[in-house]
Image (cartoon, rainbow, N blue to C red):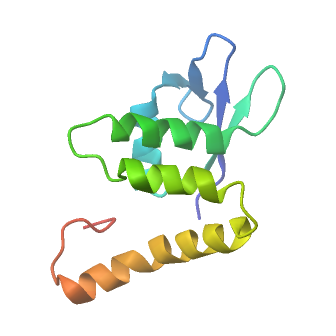
Amino acid sequence: MNELRTIKKYPNRRLYDTTESRYITLTDIRRLVLEQVDFTVIDKRSQADITRAILLQVIAEQEHGDDPLMSREFLSEVIRSQSGTMHASIALHLEQSIRHFPGAARRTHPGSQNEPGA
C-alpha cells in the first residue's frame, strides 16, 4: 500500500515532491495520477489542501491540446450546474459515470489500450 505523498506548493508557484526531494511540474502530477499514486498538494504558506485546484490545472493544461476531451457546451453546462439546486446530484452522477466508464469501454471495445495499466 502506498503512503500518502505530499507535494508542497511554494509562493513562487513551484511544486516540490517531498518523497522524491525535487521540484516537479504539472506533467509530473499527471504521471502520479496515471500511476494511481495517492498524493495531496499543500500550499506552503497557508497549509491549505489545494489538491483539487492543482488537478483542475492539470485538466486545463490537457484541454489546451489538439484533442480536448470536454466540449465548450459541456464545460458551460458544468458551470451552470454548479449554481443550481441539483449540484450534489450532478456531481455524484458525473463521478459515478467516470468511475464506471473503463468497465463499459472494455465490454464495448475489448483489448482497449486506454485503460490504466494497459
| Residue 81 visible somewhere in the drawing | yes
| Residue 38 visible somewhere in the drawing | no
**Quarter of the image holding residue 66?**
top left
- Residue 23, horizontal then vertical, whole percent: 52, 21
Q: Give the residue displayed 74% in from the left and 28% down from the top.
A: 43
**In the displayed structure, does residue 56 sit left or right of residue 118?**
right
**Quarter of the image holding residue 83?**
bottom right
Closer to us: 90 or 32: 90
Q: In the displayed image of the protein, which residue is found farthest to the top?
A: 12
**Quarter of the image holding residue 117?**
bottom left
User: Which image quadrant: the C terminus?
Assistant: bottom left
Q: Give the residue displayed 80% in from the left and 19% down from the top.
A: 45
User: Which image quadrant: the N terminus?
Assistant: bottom right
Q: In the displayed image of the protein, which residue is found farthest to the right?
A: 46
- Residue 5, horizontal then vertical, whole percent: 63, 44
- Residue 72, horizontal then vertical, whole percent: 38, 47
- Residue 80, horizontal then vertical, whole percent: 61, 54
**In the displayed structure, does residue 45 sit left or right of residue 50?**
right
Q: Give the residue displayed 63% in from the left and 31% down from the top.
A: 18
Q: How many tags in the picture?
A: 0
Work out whether 25 lies above or below 13.
below
Q: Give the residue displayed 29% in from the left and 68% down from the top.
A: 115
**In the displayed structure, does residue 9 sit left or right of residue 46?**
left
Closer to us: 54 or 24: 54
